[in-house]
Each structure stands twice: as C-alpha cells, then as structure tokens.
Image: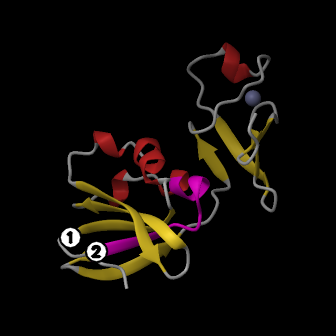
Amino acid sequence: MLNISGLNEGIVLDHIKAGKSLDIYDQLGLDRLDCQVAIIKNAHSQKMGRKDIIKIEGDVLGKIDLDVLGYIDHNITVNIIHNETIVEKKFLSRPTRITNVLKCRNPRCITSIEQGLPHIFYLADEKRDIYRCQYCDEKYSAHSAE
Ligand SMILES: [Zn+2]
C-alpha cells in the first residue's frame, strides 16, 4: 500500500526504478515548480524490491509532461491525490511522439542548421524502443550508450 501521508492534494509518482528519482526530478523540471516536492529513495516494493517515489504537492498535473515521463519509464504509476485519498491512477505508455527531449545528432539535419526548430522524434519501433528524428529519420535508441 502506497503511503501518501502528509499529502492532501497532489500527485505521487510511484514505481520509479530505485536511484532514478533525481533524473526524473531534473527531466520533468520539478525544480521550476513552486510547490513542495518530496523524494523518497529506496522504498520497499513487493514488485520491484526497491523503488523511488516522488510526491508533489498541489494542483500540478497539468504542469507535468506525462509524455516525458512515459518516455523515461512507462512503468511509473501516477497517483492523483485528493483529500488524502488516491482518486485516480494513471498508467503511462511510450509516447508516439516526443518534442524537445531528445536532440538529433545528425549534423546535416535541419534542426542542426535552424536553431529555433523543435526537436521532434517519433516512435519508430515500439518493441525495441527506437525513436527517429521526424526531419531526417536519424535513429535514437533509449538503451544504447552512444
Ligand atoms: Zn534530424
């Protein structure tokens, strides 16, 4: 059972891979939100052994990019808290399109030449988690070290 004590209104990101909560804090830009954020590292999890949890206070759902979260790890659960109760659980999926999260590394790509263009990638291969640049089709693999 997820412990949401101390949170009246807000969201709880649950089932974060242990050790990944700070990455997610950065990538979601939570430092820019004017609200309380609690990060719990290495919580016990029956399913995962260890997990991280992020609790965010306030009406922040619209300010958090669930596509980015789904891209980082679609196994994360988003719990919506109202009156100290979980009123909704959102399950994420890999976004089919993601903007300004990945950067195209192809020097001939138009995004390398025209600085103002958004970097848009689309999900080209769901099984292998491969995203490609919308402009030049350059591959970006989430699990490669390149
Ligand atoms: Zn490109």
Quadrant where the N terminus is found in the figure:
bottom left
Q: Amino acid at mark 1?
A: Leu
Residue of label 1: 7
Q: Which residues are magenta?
A: 69-81
Residue of label 2: 81
How many other residues sit within 10 Å of disc 1, few (<14), some (14-19) or many (≥20)?
many
Q: Amino acid at mark 2?
A: Ile
Say if the magenta span includes residue 1: no
Q: Is mark 2 within 8 Å of ligand 1?
A: no
Task: Please tell me whether residue 82 is drawn above or below residue 75 in the rendered image.
Answer: below
Quadrant containing ligand 1: top right
Which of the 4 image quadrants contains residue 7? bottom left
Say if the magenta span includes residue 73: yes
Apparent side of residue 63 relative to residue 101 in the rendered image (left or right): left
Q: Position of residue 76 (x, y in %)?
A: 51, 66
Cβ atoms under marks 1 and 2 closer than 8 Å: yes
Q: Residue furthest bottom?
A: 1
Residue at image position (76%, 32%) is 135
Dot 1 or dot 2, earlier in sequence: 1
Residue at image position (58%, 59%) is 73
Q: Position of residue 125 (x, y in %)?
A: 82, 55
Which of the 4 image quadrants contains residue 134? top right
Find residue 26 and name its label: none
Q: Nearer the viewer, mark 1 or mark 2?
A: 1
Quadrant where the C terminus is found in the figure:
top right
Tell me the distance, in whole angstroms, between the alpha carbons under discs 1 and 2.
7 Å
Residue at image position (36%, 80%) is 2
Which of the 4 image quadrants contains residue 26? top left
Q: Position of residue 18 (x, y in %)?
A: 50, 60
Q: Position of residue 98 (x, y in %)?
A: 61, 46
Name the secondary structure under disc 1: loop
